[in-house]
Amino acid sequence: MNLSVEDVKYVAALSKLTLTDEEIESMRTDLSNIIQSVEKLNQVDTSSVPPTTSILPIENAFREDEVIPSLPTEKLLQNAPRRDEEYILVPRIIE
């Protein structure tokens, strides 16, 4: 499949790229070659291959929640530049 110059310009616009005429011609050739290579995959018989979402086995990586002691509030807030009791004060950014 050979892409047209209009096809390349369309893809460039979708990608928000500005291409020179030389770049368009180079991309037209490169993209056409890529599409031809991918089209070869359509020739492979995959009728005996079940659909898969991943080639790796699905494994749950979660761990059980565990309550552990935390640092005291005073220790956590000791380096806060500004604070109000147990809260860190930050500059207002929304009017």
Image: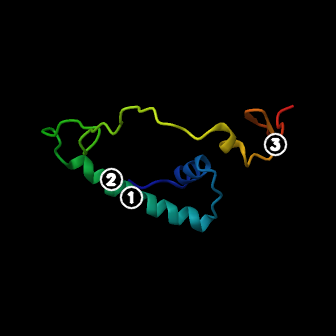
- Three-letter code for the amino acid on which mark 3 is drawn: Arg
Q: Secondary structure at mark 2?
A: helix
Image spot of residue 75 (x, y percent): 66, 44
**Which dot marks residue 43?**
none
**Which dot marks residue 38?**
2
**Which dot marks residue 34?**
1
Image spot of residue 39 (x, y percent): 31, 51
- Three-letter code for the amino acid on which mark 2 is drawn: Val
Image spot of residue 93 (x, y percent): 82, 38
Q: Secondary structure at mark 3?
A: loop
Q: Is residue 14 left or right of residue 63?
A: right
Query: Which numbered disc, 2 or 3, marks the residue that appears first in the sequence?
Result: 2
Mark 1 crowdedness (10 Å alpha carbons): few <14, some 14-19, many ≥20? few
- Three-letter code for the amino acid on which mark 1 is drawn: Ile
Residue corresponding to mark 3: 82
Whether residues under marks 1 and 2 lie with C-beta atoms below 8 angstroms apart, the answer is yes
Q: CA distance from mark 1 to mark 2?
A: 6 Å
| Residue at image location 57% in from the left, 48% down from the top | 10
Q: Is residue 60 left or right of residue 70?
A: left
Query: Which numbered disc, 1 or 3, marks the residue that appears first in the sequence?
Result: 1
Q: CA distance from mark 1 to mark 3?
A: 57 Å
Query: In which quadrant will I find the C terminus?
Result: top right
| Residue at image location 21% in from the left, 48% down from the top | 43
Q: Residue furthest right?
A: 95
